[in-house]
Amino acid sequence: MATMALHFNCSPLELDEEQILDYLHHLKSQSNTPSSSYFKHTVYGLRFSYKVMGMEQKGVFMPSLKEPHFFSYFGKPVSPLPSYIRSAPWNLEDYLTLFESAMNGQLIGEASVSYLYYYRETIENIKRVYRDNYSQLKCIAILRNPVERAWSLYVLRRQGGWEADFFKFAQQLEMPSHQSDYYNFIRSGMYSEQVKAYRKNFPYIRFFMFEEFKANTDRVVKECLDFLGVDNIVLPGNINKVYNFAGIPKNRLFSPIYDILFRENAFKSLIKPLIPSGIRLKIKTDLGKKIIKKEKIPTDVKKYLRNKFDQDLNLLLTLFDDSHKKKIIKSWIE
């Protein structure tokens, strides 16, 4: 705890959650031995300090690794994920270490978008790990208009240096060798089978539409907390903050900054290990807002995508009874 105080030049009790998670991640990455004793004792010290000071513990713990993807590929000899996100935990022991800093009495959870697309593998692996207890898990998913989602994902990938022509890229995804690609923005938007599979296997599951979340984020988050059985949680002030920016530079002057922030390059690879993830995210978010403009979906692309998703969306419509959700799905079709 003393070392932590010297690192930040303040009491650990004055730190916010992001700073603490960055420090714990720093400890894990600095370790040159299999032992995690120093990391664990830091966590124990924090727990004891919170208890002594009478500080409320957060009801839900999420690991600092944003998307572990663990259940999508657990047991596979080769990860289906792109090489630049293969640092995710590969075995069960590594996965469990993500939750070591959770406090007593907290619910633990994580969020990985691949769990919806790779629903067959994910559900099978959850059953494999949790055995008879798998049906007690609570699941939450947010569905977005697949046309908008496909375009957004394409722009995000193009931003990272992928094929610039949308239709050439779409044709590549239709090839058998690309059918299960992690970033297949066509197949990943076919929600009907995904929704049916999760409902069949998990009695405690809630689906929200992105429009609901965007229109009233606080309400949706509170509904999620109620669903999880978590009370007395004060919602953070950054709950409406946007972190991912996909688009094009507002002008040519911003292109060099854009390339450094959003594309893989030698300079970025060199400095990335030196800057804590929280600071990197803040820099990317703050600069992204200033240099990127959103790109509208071209008419021909929108028509192509609507034709692709039309049949599945009509099937999806039959899976929901809630009138508001049905209205939103109909708006995706029209």
Image (cartoon, helix red, strand yellow):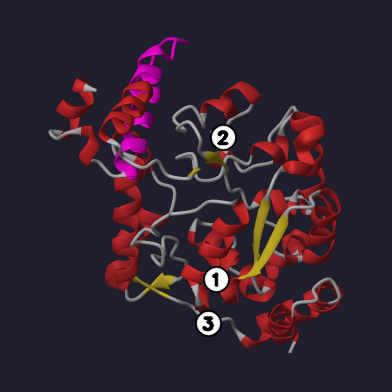
* Residue 76 shows in this picture: no
Image position of 187 (left or right of 223): right
Mark 3 or 1, nearer chain start: 1
- State which quarter of the image contains the C terminus: bottom right
Task: Identify the residue under disc 1.
Answer: 213
Position of residue 197 measured from the top left corner of the image (x, y, whole percent)? 84, 54
Residue found at x 23% / y 26%: 4
User: Mark 1 Cα within 10 Å, few/some/many (few <14, many 20+)?
Assistant: some
Position of residue 310 measured from the top left corner of the image (x, y, whole percent)? 81, 79
Q: Is residue 332 above or below residue 142?
A: below
- State which quarter of the image contains the N terminus: top left
| Label 1 SS | helix
| Label 2 SS | loop
Image position of 152 (left or right of 206): left
Instruction: Give residue 88's mark.
Output: 2
Query: Whole-Å distance between the Cαs marked 3 and 2?
Result: 33 Å
Our reading of the magenta stretch's main secondary structure is: helix
Residue found at x 60% / y 65%: 154
Task: Identify the residue under disc 3.
Answer: 296
**Highlighted magenta segment, given as a residue range:** 17-42
Q: Nearer the viewer, residue 71 or 81?
A: 71
Comparing labels 1 and 2, the label whose residue is closer to the camera: 1
Position of residue 3 measured from the top left corner of the image (x, y, whole percent)? 20, 21
Image position of 13 (left or right of 121): left
Residue found at x 37% / y 22%: 44
